[in-house]
Amino acid sequence: MTTHSDAARPLRIGLAGAGPWARLTHAPALAAHPRAVLSGVWARRPEAADALAAGHGTASYTGDAGFDELLAVSDAVAFAVPPDVQAPLAVRAADAGCHLLLDKPVATTVAGARETADAAARARVASVVFCTLRFAPGTAGWIAEQAAAGGWFTARASWIGALFAPGASSEFASPWRREKGGLWDVGPHALSVLIPVLGDVTEVVAASGPADTTHLLLRHTSGASSTVTLALDAPPGAAGTEVEFRGEHGVTALPPGGGDAAAAFRAAVDALAESARTGVAHPCDVRFGLRLTEILARAGDLGARARP
């Protein structure tokens, strides 16, 4: 575990995962980060781990024993694996004293997310959940500004993708996204913007739409309400991301600039390092990730009951 005495030393961060997200964002960002060292790459497929590690001049690991070997040479672990693979690995990493840079959602079951949060608390390790817009240079400041302004009456968020539309081709059209849909893949993004501004969710109403579409109606601790539309299987012409707040100061919309995932990930690494150094929990830590899972699980239960 990082302490004040070794805070000047670069954080050794192991990477769990070697898919497109790890290859395009995590590995290059970690390898180039001035205050981090990519200490190794672990993946379930040996050939993927070998290729990604070789491309960044680090060691590769695979298998159950290999994950323990990665933990032994790391101060922290960044995860780029499906959520229900991530959760038990993160528990092992925390138990080994490694800080956690988690992907969203932490898990798709409340039990899995809670076990991860409890493990981090038990080991007293730092944690950050990589909700992209909370760290992207073009959007993080805007979210903080809206939270500081207050006086919001209502909000609207739409996260609509076309990963599984006929003829679509994307490396990110993974089996877990096909199974869980937009609620679990892009739902954390929407909530990670709404909750810091409007407060925690106190009431959830959910209804299903075409394909994997989920509609949410939320009440927040501030008294404001919000509506959310989430999908991954929409027609290409319908795809897009929008967030809008309306209140006593007028109307404001999410600015462009949330698409630079590498810059956002570098900022998340900085946030993890600072939390590890100071012992101060980051607002977007594993406990926040647990709360996201609780809300999405509730919405999933309600949406399933509403389906014909």
Image (tube, rainbow, N blue to C red):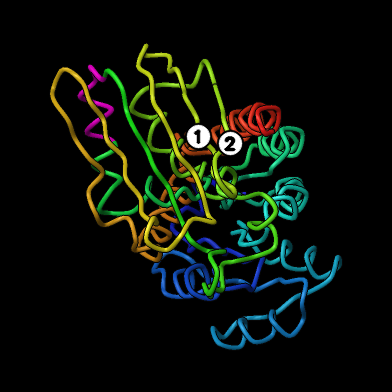
Q: Is residue 102 left or right of residue 186?
A: right
Circle 2 Cα neighbour tier, 10 Å, few/some/many (<14 / 14–19 / ≥20): many
| Prevailing secondary structure of the magenta residues | helix
The numbered disc on residue 17 is none
Q: Is residue 126 left or right of residue 151?
A: right
Q: Position of residue 119 (x, y in %)?
A: 73, 38
Circle 1 Cα neighbour tier, 10 Å, few/some/many (<14 / 14–19 / ≥20): some
Q: Amino acid at mark 1?
A: His
The numbered disc on residue 215 is 1
Q: How many marks?
A: 2
The residue lying at 72 percent from left, 72 percent from top is: 43
Q: Which residues are magenta?
A: 144-152
Residue 178 lies, with reference to residue 206, above or below; the image says: below
Q: Are marks 2 and 1 in contact (CB under 8 Å)?
A: yes
Residue 275 lies, with reference to residue 179, above or below; the image says: above
Residue furthest to the left in view is 249
Which one is nearer the viewer's eye here, 36 or 235?
235
Residue 10 lies, with reference to residue 109, above or below; the image says: below
The residue lying at 25 percent from left, 53 percent from top is: 138
> In the rendered structure, does residue 98 fall within the stretch colored magenta?
no
Dot 1 lies on which element? strand
Which residue does the numbered mark 2 point to in the structure image? 208
Of pointers 2 and 1, the one earlier in the residue sequence:
2
Which one is nearer the viewer's eye here, 203 or 205?
205
Which one is nearer the viewer's eye here, 284 or 170?
170
Dot 2 lies on which element? strand
Q: Amino acid at mark 2?
A: Ser
